[in-house]
Image (cartoon, helix red, strand yellow):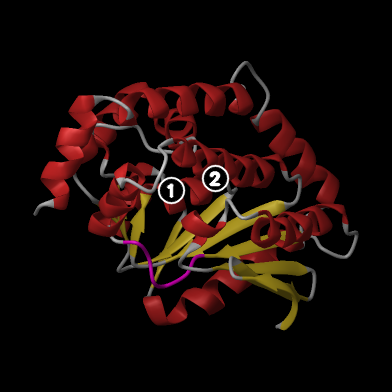
C-alpha cells in the first residue's frame, strides 16, 4: 500500500478501490490535537467523495491500551496539572470520529485484534462489518469505574442487541472473547490472528464490488428513524462529565489505580 496520508494518529492509502486506514496506539490522546486529527478527517472525507474509492477498511493497532491503562488514563485527569474538562474535549473528538465513520455512504469494515477497550470497540461498532482475530477480547470497564463507555457504544449495542442484552453486558463487568462476540452479533467474522490483514482486505474488496448506490441506500434506510446519534453523543458527554466529577467516581477510580 502506498502511503497517501499520515500523522501520529494514523497511516492511510489505497489498495485498488479500497481506502485502508491504520490507527495508532495513542489514538485517544492524539485525537484532541487539530494538526493530528485533521489529516485523518480529511482522508475520510476524500474516501467518501472519491469516485475511485468504493469501500473503506479501518485497521486497529495491534498494541492497545489495556483495561488498567484505560483506568490510569481516566485517573490522569485528576492530577493537579490537569483539568477534568480535558476529558470532555477527548469525548467530543472521539464522538466526531465515530459520527464521521457512521455517516459514510461507502461500505466500512473494521479489523482488529488483541485486548480491545470500549473506545476502540465503539469505533468498530460504527462500521458496517467487523472482523477480528480469534485471540480478541473486548473489555468494558464500565462496572469497575461506574461510568458509561464513551463513543456511543450503548447507542450501537442497543440497536444491535436490544436493551436487555446491552444492559446485561455493560453491568456484568465481564470481558467478551471473540467467539462470544460473534455469537452475539457484535462482530461478523473471526479469523486466525496471522490471517487477519489478508482476510480483512479480501472481505472489504468483496463489498467494494457491490453497487455503490445500493450500498448507500441500504445504509441510509438502516439508519432511518428517531435515533439521533448527535443528540445521543451530547447526552452521553453530559452524563460522563457528571459522573467523573462525583466523589464516588474518584473513590472508585483510586481503588482500581491502587491495585
Q: Is residue 238 left or right of residue 210?
A: left
Q: Please tell me whether residue 30 belongs to the stretch shown in magenta.
A: no
Magenta stretch, overall SS: loop
- Tell me the quarter of the picture where residue 147 sits: top left
Judged from this view, the residue extending furthest toward the front is: 80
| CB under 8 Å between discs 2 and 1 | yes
Q: Position of residue 228 (x, y in %)?
A: 62, 22
Q: Which residue is mark 1?
A: 119
Q: Is residue 94 above or below residue 234?
A: below
Locate residue 46, reporting x and y percent: 83, 58
Q: Is residue 49 or residue 10 the one in the foreground? A: 10
Mark 2, Cα crowd under 10 Å, few <14 / some 14-19 / many 20+, is many
Q: Which mark is residue 43?
A: none
Q: Counting residues from the N terminus, which is met first, the one under dot 2 or under dot 1?
A: 2
Query: SS for tag 2?
Result: helix
Foreground of the two, 21 or 255 = 255
Determine whether, in the image, residue 124 is placed left or right of residue 213.
left
Is residue 65 rendered to the left or right of residue 143? right
Give me the residue at 58% from left, 51% from top: 32
- Image coords of residue 85 (percent x, y): 46, 35
- Which residue in the protein does label 2 denote? 94
Is residue 64 highlighted in magenta? yes
- Residue in the image at 28% along x and 34% along y: 170
Q: Residues within 10 Å of mark 1 (few under 14, many from 20)?
A: many
The reply to whether residue 187 is visible in this rendering is no
Mark 2 vs mark 1, CA separation in Å: 8 Å
Q: Residue at x 75, y 46 (%)?
A: 215
Q: What kind of element bears circle 1?
A: helix
Q: Is residue 259 visible?
A: yes
Residue bounds of the magenta highlight: 60-65
Amino acid at each position: 500500500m502506498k502511503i497517501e496520508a499520515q500523522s501520529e494518529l494514523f497511516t492511510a492509502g489505497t489498495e485498488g478501490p479500497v481506502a485502508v486506514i491504520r490507527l495508532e496506539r495513542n489514538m485517544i490522546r492524539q485525537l484532541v490535537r487539530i494538526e493530528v486529527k485533521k489529516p485523518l478527517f480529511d482522508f475520510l472525507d476524500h474516501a467518501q467523495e472519491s469516485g475511485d474509492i468504493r469501500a473503506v477498511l479501518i485497521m486497529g493497532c495491534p498494541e492497545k491500551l489495556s483495561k488498567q491503562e484505560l483506568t490510569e488514563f481516566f485517573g490522569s485527569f485528576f492530577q493537579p496539572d490537569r483539568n477534568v474538562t480535558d476529558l470532555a474535549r477527548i469525548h467530543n473528538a472521539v464522538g466526531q470520529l465515530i459520527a464521521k465513520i457512521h455517516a459514510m455512504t461507502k461500505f466500512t469494515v473494521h479489523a482488529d485484534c488483541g485486548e480491545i477497550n470500549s473506545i476502540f470497540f465503539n469505533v468498530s461498532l460504527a462500521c458496517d462489518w467487523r472482523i477480528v482475530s480469534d485471540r480478541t477480547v473486548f473489555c468494558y470497564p464500565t462496572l469497575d469505574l461506574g461510568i458509561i463507555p464513551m463513543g456511543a457504544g450503548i447507542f450501537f449495542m442497543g440497536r444491535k442487541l436490544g436493551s436487555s442484552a446491552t444492559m446485561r453486558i455493560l453491568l456484568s463487568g465481564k470481558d467478551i472473547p471473540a467467539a462470544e462476540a460473534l455469537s452475539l452479533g457484535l462482530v461478523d467474522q473471526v479469523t486466525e490472528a496471522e490471517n487477519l490483514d489478508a482476510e480483512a482486505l479480501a472481505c472489504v474488496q468483496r463489498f467494494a464490488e457491490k453497487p455503490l448506490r445500493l450500498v448507500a441506500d441500504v445504509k441510509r434506510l438502516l439508519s432511518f428513524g428517531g435515533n439521533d446519534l448527535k443528540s445521543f453523543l451530547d447526552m452521553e458527554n453530559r452524563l460522563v462529565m457528571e459522573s467523573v466529577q462525583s466523589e464516588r467516581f474518584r473513590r472508585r477510580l483510586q481503588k482500581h489505580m491502587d491495585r
